Amino acid sequence: MPAKKTTVVAADDDPQLLRLVTRNLQMDGYEVIAASDGQQALEQIEARLPDLALLDLMMPRLDGFTVCQRVREFSNLPIIILTARGADQDKIRGLDLGADDYLTKPFSIEELLARVRAVLRRSQAAHNDAGHGVQTVTTIGDLTIDYGQRRVTMAGRDVDLTPVEYRVLAYLAQNAGRVITQDLLLTHVWGDEYEGESHLLQVNVNRLRRKLEPDPTHPRYLLTKTGVGYLLATNPTE
């Protein structure tokens, strides 16, 4: 029996771009489910449970922001958002709603395929990490990270993290007390081709602080070393 193809939901209201993306993903070996608006995309994601979603942000019926938010209510499905050139606030908002990566229009097909492969690679790595069964646990203050179960708790309460958020936190926890540069974090969590993509890192660190810190505006655990990077404090103070 042939191996099941990796399935991608591709959603964009520009029919020419959607055909181009669909055709090239298919040529690269993916099964593609095309959607011309956000409502169709959400319905296909719910019905087909794909391996990845590629969402334009500006779509009729439901925009990409809303689709991303709805999907995050029930799934950690990898999501790449498509944004207009210069729309940095849209990138930040999309990432803040749980998207894993973004592509800026206009983009090359080579860049599209590289981003798709990178996001799927990270998703598979997270799945493999979860299956290793290593029962190593890090506890710092009220924060506990169980790497074997990929479970994070704060004062005994489970903290729901996206796969990317978990990988950022786990890497910092495995190097607790050490300052990790932005580029090192980016290449470890996202891949070598993401060096310099500070938006991705800043948004995910901010999301982690909102989920972990008693007061995200005055973090005790996830600290910033301005101009250098981040560290997870070994002795969080009040």
Image (cartoon, rainbow, N blue to C red):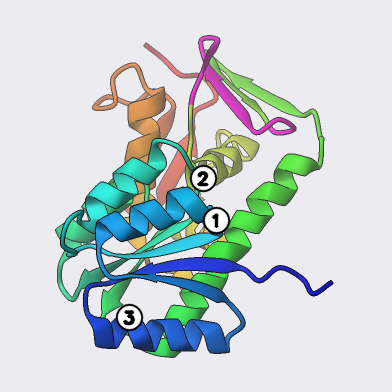
Query: Marks 3/1: CA distance?
Result: 29 Å
* Labels 1 & 2 near each other (Cβ < 8 A): yes
Q: Which mark is residue 18?
A: 3
Q: Is residue 127 visible?
A: yes
**Corner quadrant of residue 132:** top right
Position of the N terminus by quadrant = bottom right
Relative horizontal placement of residue 3, taking residue 61 as reference (left or right): right
Q: Which residues are magenta?
A: 147-159
Secondary structure beneath label 3: helix
How many neighbours does mark 2 have within 10 angstroms: few (below 14), some (14-19), or many (20 or more)? some
Tell me which residue sits at (24%, 27%) in the image. 217
State which mark lies toward you, 3 or 1. Answer: 3
Q: CA distance from mark 1 to mark 2?
A: 6 Å
The residue beneath circle 2 is 168
The foreground one among 152 and 67 is 67
Dot 1 surroundings within 10 Å: few (below 14), some, or many (20 or more)? many
Q: Give the quadrant of the C terminus.
A: top left
Q: Do the residues bearing badges 2 and 3 touch, measured as CB atoms within 8 Å?
A: no
Which residue is located at x 27 percent, y 24 percent?
A: 218
**Is label 2 in a helix, a strand or a loop?**
helix
Q: Is residue 231 left or right of residue 199?
A: right
Q: Which mark is residue 189?
A: 1
Where in the figure is residue 94, as x and y percent of width and height?
27, 53
Residue type at numbered disc 3: Leu
Residue 145 found in image quarter: top right
Q: Which amino acid, mark 1?
A: Val
First in sequence: mark 2 or mark 3? 3
The answer to which of marks 3 and 1 sits earlier in the sequence is 3
Position of residue 96 measured from the top left corner of the image (x, y, whole percent) = 29, 46
Residue nearest the viewer, comparing 136 with 115: 115
